[in-house]
Image (cartoon, rainbow, N blue to C red):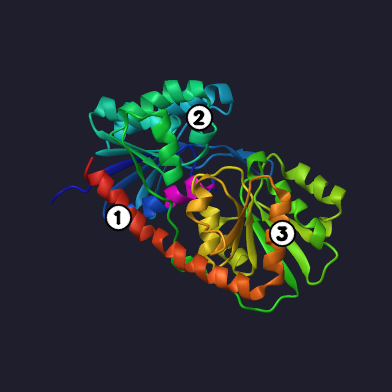
Amino acid sequence: MKKPIKVGIVVSEFPPTGLGGTEIATQKIASLLAQRNLDVHIITRNVRFMRKGKNYTLKKVENYKGYQIHRVSCSTRPIFRFLTQFIFGLITLLRIKPDIIHGQQITQSGLIAVVAGKLLRKKSIVWARGSEIYDSSQFYRRSIGQFIISHASVVLAISTHMKNFMGNIWPHKQISTLHNGIDLKNYYRDPSPKSTIELLFIGRLVRIKRVSDAIRSLLPFKDKIPKVMLTIIGSGPREQFLKKMSNKIGVQDHVRFMGKISHDKIPRNLAVADIFIFPSQREGLPLAVLEAMASSLPILASKSTGITELVQDQINGLLHTPGNINELIENLRKLIQNKVLREEMGKASKEIVQFFGWEKIINQLLFFYLNM
């Protein structure tokens, strides 16, 4: 009997401790590849977390839904984190001996993947997914980034914009586009009547997401009927600043901060929303927007990078120039005042997102695996 193809996927964090777009996508990829009878191994950091005042770590090796998770020791100090993840991640891959080595992002995960590929004489694939491309320094791009891109067997970008951006940096390398996926069957609408217009933001509370713009856009509507409410799901270094800002500008009664919640609760929150708002400065191909589209929501977003590959202005949402709050307010006004427009754009979102179903994405990923 022929042995199944063994795949090692390297990712910095992984659920349940990592709940960002890359981590959620990696979990889905691992599950779907295992269902296709591949022998899947996740290599990730063993992140410490607090529970009831005590430090905990997860199991070093765990069988989960048909694949194995290998959590490697890693320093909590930033100066040593890169080095320890690289050393122990590489040792783990050399022990597992995958047939295909897959690095999520052009970071230490990608570096581990290509070095292991060279040492094991196996094919490696790296998948650029966002900030590591747009926010990295010229030094990083020309040093570690250059090494990863040059030595990977296949390089993928999560959006066409990112592919073109990377092509200008590394013109010597062929780069292909492979989008993020979405589990379409998990998302739905709740038609129950409401006395409010419900806006929703989901994401990390960091400066680049421009959540402050979403909060400021409420100002013209704070004394109007029906009441406009913004729910913010996520945590991050800007959380306290955003709460204080809400109080300062007088919209605190129109903003709910829910913090980080488990991913299985996201569909319910999307189901009761009326509008998804996402004023981010720069994105790869945001999972949060895909999830909102799968929930038949109109999207208020900025004209930035990968977002424009999901949101067609005037079709399934309204786009504004990043940072232009006046444009955002006017777009919000249009959707608040026009329920029919919200419903039409929501239906368009549902139609567009069908092209991003995970089954299609996994078929494309398998094509790259088998044709490297």
Q: Label 3, secondary structure: give it.
A: helix
Q: Which mark is residue 330?
A: 3
Q: Is residue 91 visible?
A: no
- Among the 4 quarters of the image, the one containing residue 181: bottom left
Q: Is residue 100 left or right of residue 12?
A: left
Q: Position of residue 3 (x, y in %)?
A: 18, 47
Q: Label 2, secondary structure: give it.
A: loop
Q: Position of residue 234 (x, y in %)?
A: 64, 50
Magenta part of the protein: which range? 20-27
Task: Give whichever of 246, 10 is nearer the camera.
Answer: 246
Q: Tell me which residue sits at (39%, 24%) in the image.
A: 146
| 87 lies above or below 123 | above
Report, in whole angstroms, how far the alpha carbon at label 1 lies from the one at label 3: 41 Å
Q: Rate crowding at label 2 as few (under 14), some (14 to 19) or many (20 or more) other CA atoms within 10 Å.
A: many
Q: Tell me which residue sits at (57%, 37%) in the image.
A: 48
Q: Position of residue 32 (x, y in %)?
A: 35, 56
Q: Is residue 21 magenta?
A: yes
**Which residue type does callout 1 highlight?**
Asn
Number of numbered markers: 3
**Nearer the N terminus, badge 2 or badge 3?**
2
Q: Rate crowding at label 3 as few (under 14), some (14 to 19) or many (20 or more) other CA atoms within 10 Å.
A: some
**Nearer the N terminus, badge 1 or badge 3?**
3
Q: Which mark is residue 74?
A: 2
Q: Which mark is residue 363?
A: 1
Task: Give whichever of 314, 66 is nearer the camera.
Answer: 314
Report, in whole angstroms, how far the alpha carbon at label 1 lies from the one at label 2: 33 Å
Q: Is residue 101 visible?
A: yes
Q: Nearer the viewer, mark 1 or mark 3?
A: 3
- Among the 4 quarters of the image, the one containing residue 370: top left
| 334 lies above or below 2 | below
